[in-house]
Image (cartoon, rainbow, N blue to C red):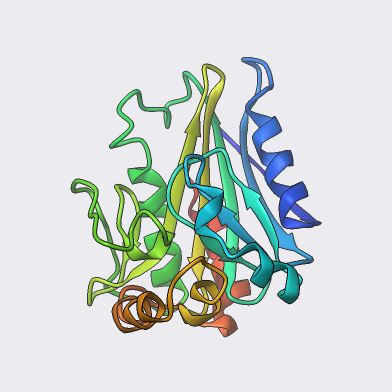
Amino acid sequence: MAWAVEHLSGTVRELHERSAALLAGTSEMGRVARVLQPVDQAVVLGSTQALTSVDQDACASAGVDIVRRRSGGGAVLVDATTLLWVDLVVPAGDPLWSPDVGRAAWWVGEAWSEALFRSGIAGTEVWKGPLVRNRWSSLVCFGGLGAGEVVSAAGQKVVGISQRRTRNGALFQCGCLLEWAPQPLLGLLALTPDERSAGLATLGEAALGAGVERAEALEAALASVLP
């Protein structure tokens, strides 16, 4: 089954709304891969994450929007420089659809792992174990680890994946880190100075960027390896 590959530009808020709308389609919907290019910055919260976890005044001062996605997980600071954002949609009944939420994203991670390999990053693995939770995982997306996500040879998270499922299909929202520095996100969260220092000490080694210079190659490689 062929993929419809689309490139969209807009605010983070607009792009999230457009991807969520794909799941409102009919049973005739097909596979869609959207490469999303934001024109602004936003702290994107998981579907159940409290708004009080964000320092709204700090976001307003920095000109950073606050957006809530409809898929789960912790917060992500989304911009066009540090994150390659790709949304994948498969209809219910598609061979890639799985009723097992834990296994549903394995193929997504495998595609990203192959794309990373073709772009010069070897040794990545797809996490197929249980959720890895810690002090920071419910607050910061790249602080934890879920099924289907991609880690480096050293166990650092490179690709984060969240999913939303309806009777029409599944939306996999993927963020491949190009650069990783937890300071900008932590500076926009409602934390005490001590909490922020602890986050910097812990999260700095939790994730790994693939390199801004690889963005175009990664995008092309992913499109070529989608099953």
Q: Position of residue 139 (x, y in %)?
A: 41, 58
Q: Position of residue 65 (x, y in %)?
A: 71, 60
Is 1 positioned to the left or the right of 120 in the image?
Answer: right
Q: Residue at x 36, y 35 (%)?
A: 104
Q: Residue at x 63, y 73 (%)?
A: 216
Towards the viewer: 7 or 101: 101
Towards the viewer: 139 or 226: 139
Q: Position of residue 90 (x, y in %)?
A: 53, 32
In the rendered image, is residue 224 in sight?
Answer: no
As drawn, the residue found furthest toward the left would be 129
Instruction: Please tell me in which quadrant of the rendered image residue 17 appears.
Output: top right
Instruction: Please tell me in which quadrant of the rendered image residue 113 appears.
Output: bottom left
Q: Is residue 76 above or below residue 32?
A: below
Q: Position of residue 36 (x, y in %)?
A: 69, 56
Q: Is residue 2 above or below residue 214?
A: above
| Count of numbered marks | 0
Is 118 positioned to the left or the right of 155 in the image?
Answer: right
Which quadrant does the N terminus fall into? top right
Towards the viewer: 174 or 48: 48
Q: Residue at x 65, y 51 (%)?
A: 67
